[in-house]
Image (tube, helix red, strand yellow):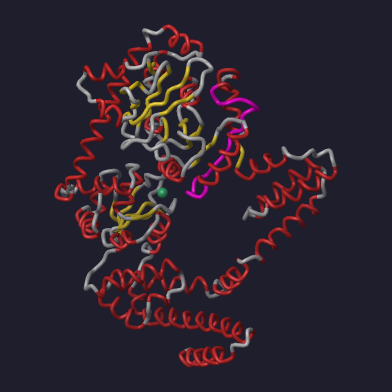
Amino acid sequence: MYFSEDKISEIIEKNDIVDLISQYLNLTKKGKNHWGLCPFHTEKTPSFSVSIEKQLFYCFGCGVGGNAITFVQKIERLSYVEALYFLAKRAGISFDERINKNDLEEIKIKEKLYKINMEAAKYFYENIRENSNAMAYLSNRGLEQGVARKFGIGYSLDSWDKLNRFLKLKGYSDELMEKAGLIVKKDRGYYDRFRNRIMFPIMDLKGNIIAFGGRVLDESKPKYLNSPETVIYSKSKNIYALNIVKEIRSLKDIIVVEGYMDVISLYQFGIKNAVASLGTSLTAQQAKLLKRYADEIIIAYDSDAAGQSATLKGLSILQKEGCRVKVLALPEGMDPDDFIREKGVSAFNDLLNRSYSLIEYKILNTKKNYNLNILDDKVRFSKKLAAILCELESPIETDVYIKKYSKEMQINEEAIYAEVKKNKRKHISGNNRHNIISRLKKEGNNLSGQIIAEQKVLNICILYRDKSEYVFKKIKPDDFSKSLHEKIANIINLKIKEGKLISAGELLIHLENEKEKENASQIFNIDISEKDIELLDYYIDRIYQFSIENKIEELIKVMNECYEIKEEEKANKIFMEIMDLQKKKK
Ligand SMILES: [Zn+2]
């Protein structure tokens, strides 16, 4: 549903942040801020601050920060839109007038689909006890009754239309059954999609049954059959068993496996933090969802080739979303279900403790392709190794890996170092080189003072309206050196033009992603003293001067390029511009 900017502002305004956070933790007022023990990391002395004035929170311990919406997202583990609903409800803001007829119709259909799926699940569950083959399957797998019930495991009868007839008796139409993916239309009528299969209900985070997975009892094909995509089910957006795992208190990591049976087996052996991605490889949406609930994700896919390439893909997707990732490597030809039933839980825990980091996993995966007893392979592998290690940013980490593998392969450490260095240089000499050098120049000794000046000015703009008008008469948003600063300056400047006041908490609404919001809350946590107000002109001047220097530097580059390609007329024009700028410099 659509939330207008005004509506979001209203939500922020009507949910005072101190009042909101007080519902979750004890806050004590000290100075301008309220302080408490951070709910997002363990601590004994309060470093979690809440500011009424700015309508922001920030933890000096773990760096988490944001506005009321961010807080609710984190503490209630909600998506952005869900958090807006939550806060709207809390403040008694109604949305009903915004629900149009189509939305209402969709909500109604969804509810009907949840209900019909629930009926089907109950039916499958009842069936299983009446079918000896299905019962035998479960007991062969050593599955306990309680666990089977917890996951709602059922059985679809070996019949073309038993489910169809059952649901009809309950008053459901063929049309709705088809919409739910429970029956399939054929020339002469409908037939049940799932026949003679063990049934696994798939639930969303709220516990609604949104789809089914069915597994054959024997070796017939296809081994797994899933519900099609429906109004309520999208394979790429849901994760099997996350509704169960998310209930674990102080959940630290989540294990991602391929199949339902892997999740269920692990659960039965006491490893209750496993979920299954419903396809072979993870999607960005699933990664985002996982990140909401745990900091670290461990991938435990099958050890076959498909599983391994899915592992690598999954790892990079998770990493892109900012998750810490590890890989649990299973022995050749095994999945987590086989492994834990054959080797037991302590062997599984051993593997878990020995999970590999992404870099290690890449190295091992590469190593498999070489016979390190052959000199030629040794050389080729060490080149590959150097290319992988070159991704590492920390020299200490690089060092550790080089030491480890030089010993293992009996290659001189220095040789690998040299190779890594060569790779890094190659890395930089690509397109990046230009950017890196100009960035380094910018970030020279001037950096910290410059950035502080910019942050002070942004804070003053938020706290003192008259000052903010003054600031933007003297400088422009693009005079700020960092892109986030420029963005914030732009937002404030726009609001001034609209004649509106904006709090820091409200400003965060206009930023795109979590990281930006967090960085912005950090910026707005700087204290502004009387002295800073006195220094405002100095800060403004510093920003202006620095911006001119940058512009000059950029123009000199362009001018030189013009000279090189013999566009002298253009180069001369730029030269004049540079001279003008020089005059403005102090
Ligand atoms: Zn914290």
Q: Residue 145: horizontal and vertical position, in percent?
A: 40, 13
Q: Quadrant of residue 242?
A: top left
Q: Residue at x 84, y 45 (%)?
A: 376
Position above or below: 195 against 391: above
Up-down relation of residue 369 to residue 390 (above or below): above
Task: Answer yes or no: is residue 43 visible.
Answer: no
User: Magenta segment, which residues?
Assistant: 319-337
- Magenta stretch containing residue 457, yes or no? no
Q: Is residue 406 left or right of residue 259?
A: right
Q: Is residue 325 magenta?
A: yes
The reply, left or right, for residue 476 in relation to residue 328 is left
Q: Position of residue 107 (x, y in %)?
A: 22, 39
Query: Within the image, what quadrant is residue 152 found in?
Result: top left
Residue sitting nearer the eye, 201 or 350: 201
Q: Height in image: 217 above or below 97?
A: above
* Residue 263 locus on image (x, y percent): 47, 26
Q: Residue at x 58, y 22 (%)?
A: 339
Task: From the top left corner, tell me how far across and down residue 137 is, in percent.
Answer: 48, 12
